């Protein structure tokens, strides 16, 4: 029997974490049970190649608080997190990694902090237990860049241990590796963000799934964030500014072409270039108009979550209809 309307949903993406799952579940229960609130745990198996799903499903058979979602393949941390958030029913959402480096014992403290009037509570791994060259230094640089671009000085954007008010996250679009930018995006839109020191442990099992190659993806996502911040609210104005450049060039070249009509040089090259610049200007303005309509009437999503979900455990009847399968 599933609990109704939990106050807290804990979303944990998993990838090849068969050795960590049981201990992680135990530590979450030990941390949250004393809070005496209704809560649920959502393990999202992101296409693991080991027995992660089988181990987690075995635990879920004896505990209705735990639900396990299996994705059809390895989509990455952000889509896995989005799948869990989309399925979560709690008023407050907690996210964390599944490798036991985040400590679930910090959740009660962060939950209390959230209820001091904040919308988001971000964990800060002030004593991070990771390699200096491949993890710590890139993280320091990334956090500095994110702070400069967004104007939100969050010390540890990469820490997965965060708590959110669910109504904010349910409306949040997810892309690529952009889960790390969510606090900055929400802060820019007026949400109240708190940062708290949290514990961080060295990895006990397996190997890290992320390397230096992730930096490139983060930089691309940072560029996307900057573009969204500059363009999203008034796309027509941004594209109109871009369109002004080819429009002015078109007019200048047209005047030069008219001047040459009275001389001996009656080449069609300049008029052709002028027309091309004019069409470029109209094209950019058209993009701005389309952007305005998308902003007003549409939404951007990383994918339809129903197409990436393969199996779920401990479903309600409504969940079963949505996914089409129930793990037995």
Image (spheres, rainbow, N blue to C red):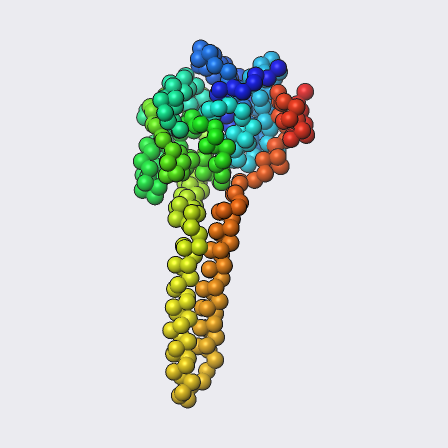
Q: Quadrant of the C terminus?
A: top right
| Residue 60 higher or lower than 283, as above or below | above
Residue drawn at x 49%, y 35% as measured from the top left: 171
Residue 305 falls in image quadrant: top right
Question: How far across and down, in percent of the image, does residue 21 sit?
Answer: 52, 20
Outermost bottom residue: 264
Please state if 20 lies on the left or on the right of 202 as rendered.
right
Image-quadrant location for residue 306: top right
Q: Is residue 134 visible?
A: no
Q: Quadrant of the N terminus?
A: top right
In which image quadrant can residue 48 be found?
A: top right
- The residue under the point 41% across, 66% down is 246
Q: Is residue 20 left or right of residue 132?
A: right
Q: Residue at left 56%, top 18%?
A: 4
**Where is residue 262 drawn, in percent x and y?**
40, 87
Front one among 165 and 226: 165
Task: Look at the image and tell me whether residue 83 can be seen.
Answer: yes
Seen from the viewer's position, the closer of residues 327 and 319 is 319
In the image, 271: left or right of 311?
left
Question: Residue 315 location, x and y as percent?
Answer: 63, 23
């Amino acid at each position: 029997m599933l609990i109704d309307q939990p106050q807290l949903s804990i979303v944990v993406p998993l990838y090849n974490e068969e050795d960590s799952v049981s201990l992680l579940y135990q530590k979450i229960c030990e941390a949250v049970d004393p809070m005496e609130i209704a809560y649920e745990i959502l393990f999202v198996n992101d296409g693991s190649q080991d027995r992660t799903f089988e181990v987690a499903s075995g635990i879920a058979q004896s505990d209705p608080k735990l639900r396990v979602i299996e994705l059809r393949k390895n989509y990455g941390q952000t889509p896995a997190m989005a799948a869990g958030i989309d399925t979560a029913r709690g008023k407050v959402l907690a996210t964390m990694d599944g490798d036991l480096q985040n400590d679930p014992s910090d959740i009660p403290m962060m939950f209390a902090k959230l209820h001091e009037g904040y919308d988001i509570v971000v964990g800060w791994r002030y004593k991070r237990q990771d390699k200096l060259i491949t993890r710590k230094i890139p993280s320091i640089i990334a956090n500095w860049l994110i702070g400069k671009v967004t104007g939100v000085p969050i010390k540890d954007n990469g820490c997965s241990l965060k708590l959110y008010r669910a109504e904010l996250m349910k409306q949040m679009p997810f892309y690529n590796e952009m889960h790390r930018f969510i606090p900055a995006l929400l802060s820019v839109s007026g949400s109240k963000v708190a940062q708290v020191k949290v514990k961080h442990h060295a990895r006990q099992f397996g190997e890290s799934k992320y390397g230096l190659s992730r930096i490139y993806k983060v930089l691309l996502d940072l560029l996307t964030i900057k573009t969204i911040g500059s363009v999203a609210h008034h796309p027509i104005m941004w594209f109109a500014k871009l369109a002004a450049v080819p429009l002015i060039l078109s007019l200048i070249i047209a005047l030069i072409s008219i001047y040459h009509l009275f001389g001996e040089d009656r080449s069609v090259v300049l008029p052709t270039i002028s027309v091309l610049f004019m069409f470029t200007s109209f094209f950019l303005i058209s993009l701005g108009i389309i952007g305005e309509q998308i902003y007003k009437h549409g939404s951007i999503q990383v994918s339809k979550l129903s197409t990436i979900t393969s199996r779920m455990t401990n479903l309600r009847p409504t969940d079963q209809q949505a996914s089409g399968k129930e793990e037995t």
